[in-house]
Amino acid sequence: MNEFERIEHWTKSLNQKDESIKVPIGDDCALVESGGLKLLLSNDEQIEGHHFKRHFPPKGVGFKLIASNVSDIYACGGTPLWVNLAIALPPELPEGWMLSFYEGVSSACERFKLSITGGNTAASDTLSLGAFIVGRCDRFIARRGAKPDERLMLTGPLGESRAGLEHLLAERAIQSETDNAVVKSHLYPDLPSKLVAFIAEHATSAIDISDGLAGDLGHLMAQSGVGFLIEEPEALYSPHLLEYCRQDGKRALKYALFGGEDYQIAFTLPESQVKKAQSLGASLIGRATDTQKLQIHGPKEALELPAKGFVHF
Ligand code: ADP
Ligand code: MG
């Protein structure tokens, strides 16, 4: 069983009949409605050894934790409001580490205009930093809703975060503008704040790219019952990613499709809205099809993929 089959298997016994849950398990956020307010709920964590190593800058770990949570709210077309933190830490962790971590948290809270409302702190063998986020929305944009022939858009280039992670894991010194850019993309992801209102108004489906484009589009495909054809793979790459791949002899497409944690949003739209989306900074990368396959057919490359991205375990 993969991660998603396991979650389904575990949660079968919940047997809930709560009318306030409008979108249950299975999307980027849950949608609950109370007192006329549409609230979005999600959570995400950063775990030492899995998401980061002790030598990574703690400020970046803090920023990324908040950004990864905000990303799920954005993917549903919402506005982030409040975050509670769940901190489990080994007692010997230097005080300075947590102070820097909180500097990163604070910087992300300012950037994304949200507040920390509380949390919990526990002792643990593993350093684990979790966050639970609440947001609100007017119109919930789900993973389901894409229809064949609608256009597939992306809010920003992919793959840099994975390149930055590799750079940090290798403990290489930052020697160039490219090194600096990819590491920054990993630790301080540049979320598409400016496009969220447009997505909320016009998108027919959306997902944030946390596990790699291939796998995350796989969720849109499964829930919308469509396939995707990527006709503009060049639009997936940033100049920094291309330079990183050129230096290291790597293939940019692999980074874009299977690298995770870019926290850009892939969304679908009717053709009539494409120009407006482009004017706000989104790129047209392809279209939805009725094939149930993920196909890439650009000027330089053509392939067909099983929909799979990063598998957590
Ligand atoms: P994302 O990548 O957007 O953070 P995930 O892939 O982590 O989303 O989760 C997919 C869906 O499964 C979400 O709706 C999430 O709320 C739900 N989910 C994940 N883990 C669990 C769990 N242990 N119990 C119940 N629901 C879960
Ligand atoms: Mg998500």
Image (spheres, rainbow, N blue to C red):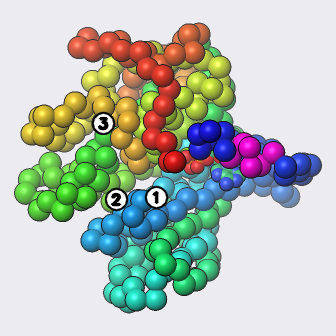
User: Would you say the residues marked 1 and 2 are in contact, meaning their CB atoms lie under 8 Å apart?
Assistant: yes
User: Would you say the residues marked 2 and 3 are in contact, meaning their CB atoms lie under 8 Å apart?
Assistant: no
Residue 146 placement (x, y as % from top left): 61, 23
Front disc: 2 or 3: 3
Q: Is residue 115 left or right of residue 234?
A: right
Residue to which mark 3 is pinned: 255
**Sequence-wise first label, 2 or 3:** 2
Q: Nearer the viewer, residue 247 or 185?
A: 247
**Sequence-wise first label, 3 or 1:** 1
Query: Is the residue 82 above or below the residue 151 in the image?
Result: below
Q: Is residue 174 left or right of residue 8?
A: left
Residue to which mark 1 is pinned: 67
Q: CA distance from mark 3 to mark 1?
A: 20 Å
Query: Is the residue 244 above or below the residue 277 in the image?
Result: below
Residue 248: quarter of image: top left
Q: Is residue 95 left or right of residue 245?
A: right
Amino acid, disc 2 = Tyr
Task: Name the residue rendered at 30%, 36% in the picture.
Answer: 255
Residue 8 in the magenta stretch? The answer is: yes
Residue 145: quarter of image: top right
Amino acid, disc 1 = Ala
Where in the image, quadrant-wise, is ligand 2 located? top right
Residue 181 placement (x, y as % from top left): 21, 52
Is residue 111 visible from the viewing direction of this image? no
Few, some or many C-alpha atoms within 10 Å of disc 3 (few <14, some 14-19, many ≥20)? many
Residue to which mark 2 is pinned: 188
Q: CA distance from mark 2 to mark 3?
A: 18 Å
Q: Please provide the residue range marked out in magenta.
A: 7-12
Query: Is the residue 156 above or below the residue 105 in the image?
Result: above
Task: Name the residue rendered at 31%, 40% in the picture.
Answer: 159
